[in-house]
Image (cartoon, rainbow, N blue to C red):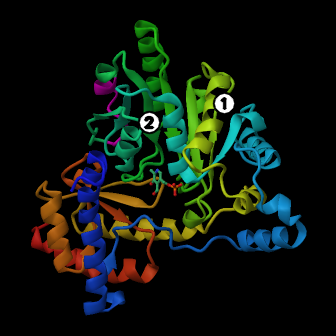
Amino acid sequence: GKMISDKMKRYTQGNSAIRAMFEEGKQMAKKFGKENVYDFSLGNPNVPAPKEVNEAILDIVKNENSLELHGYMSNAGYESVRSEIADFINKKHGTNFNESNIIMTVGAAGGLNVLFKTLLNPGEEVITFAPFFSEYRMYTENYDANLVVISPNTVDFQPNIKEFEEKITVKTKVVIINSPNNPTGVVYSEETLISIGKILEKKSKEFGTDIYIVSDEPYRELVYGDIEVPYVTKYYKNALVGYSFSKSLSLPGERIGYIVIPDEADDSELIKNGAIIATRILGFVNSPSLIQKVVSKCLNCKADIEFYDKNRRILYEALTSYGFECTKPDGAFYLFLKTPNNDDAEFVKTAKKYNILLVGAASFGCPGYVRIAYCVSRQTVENSLPKFKELAKEYSL
Ligand code: PLP
């Protein structure tokens, strides 16, 4: 047991629990038939990519020069692609970016690692608000920094601002936020962003440090009704954005996204150069070439959000009518449910008796809740409802 690093040994142990759950789901599908298992455990889009994506692929492959299309380019990505993305953001949010502010990444996961590699010294702190995407811990520890978790505000799942202010230290380098949020589906309000910005300005002055917000936004386009997701660079100068096309265009396997580094940020030029070098030395070298060109032609497209919206409304209405307490989700494709006896491990186990597969939110830093990923077929949603009803009865709701 001395062949792999201590850190990786810990991760392989954690991972076997996830793998066990995945295997169990597969076994259940075999035993009961796939249509009789209600698997809400994975955040994997099940709406196909818009047709424009395949059309763009065909068009590009047919018409572009092979060497240019499949060759190395600047580590930051194609200049023309970055320029089109900058224009798109500017038009949408009234910002003033150009290609130098955009670096293409290998999804949000790649982008966050590039930013963390660029910013973090060993022992520095990354603050996150529970509930949070659990990979943030690994991304932080990749650079020997420490994740500091702010406990959840279970009233409305906006960040717990009071505890946040108390936990900022001289070692705080990054505050990572995620809105629309995985796992709650909550969109952080403008008021929240203003408060976070004000506190960071005050604290960075007090400590004489620079503290960066890193906004993880793979779900930005997945919002329902007339909800607006405020653009964080407008509220705080040291705000960096990580975007991904994994969910908005249903392309998670293609590994494509970008980061935004505004000129207003302290040490902006250094961060840009650092991030370009980090892209190379982390082994990405650059983000995949063909799909860079594809997304630049599909910036105004998105996957069929209506489909997720309908799943959301069906589930939210049914589950609350059965007596479950759920957070009203405005975005992403997750519903966050409070477990009746405040024990997510027990609830996940009981739900399994009804062939319903859920993820306990202890793994997101929020015990007592479960996440329901409703990026599943309509049939799965509809057939699961009588089972959820029986589950509610078991808890005398
Ligand atoms: N951040 C959050 C909050 C996510 O939910 C995910 C994926 O589910 C990621 C980042 C990683 O996304 P990507 O596929 O763009 O790397």
Q: Give the Cα distance between marks 2 and 1.
A: 21 Å
Q: Is residue 353 above or below residue 231?
A: below
Q: Residue furthest front?
A: 3
Position of residue 329 measured from the top left corner of the image (x, y, whole percent): 41, 54
Q: How many residues crowd mark 2 within 10 Å: few (<14), some (14–19), many (20+)?
A: many
Position of residue 151 measured from the top left corner of the image (x, y, whole percent): 26, 36
What's the residue at 36%, 15% (across, down)? 170
Which of disc 1 and disc 2 is earlier in sequence? 2
Q: Which image quadrant: the N terminus?
A: bottom left
Q: Is residue 261 above or below residue 39?
A: above
Work out whether residue 234 can be spotted.
yes
User: Which element is circle 1 on?
Assistant: helix
What's the residue at 24%, 80% (across, down)? 355
Which residue corresponds to mark 1? Answer: 273
Q: Nearer the viewer, residue 41 or 66?
A: 66
Q: Which image quadrant: the C terminus?
A: bottom left
**How many numbered circles are shown?**
2
Q: Nearer the viewer, residue 13 or 361?
A: 13
User: Which element is circle 2 on?
Assistant: strand
What's the residue at 33%, 64% (across, down)? 372
**Quarter location, residue 293:** bottom right
Q: Is residue 161 magenta?
A: yes
Q: Is residue 219 magenta?
A: no
Residue 176 numbered mark, or none: 2
Q: Nearer the viewer, residue 337 or 260?
A: 260
Q: Which residues are magenta?
A: 156-164
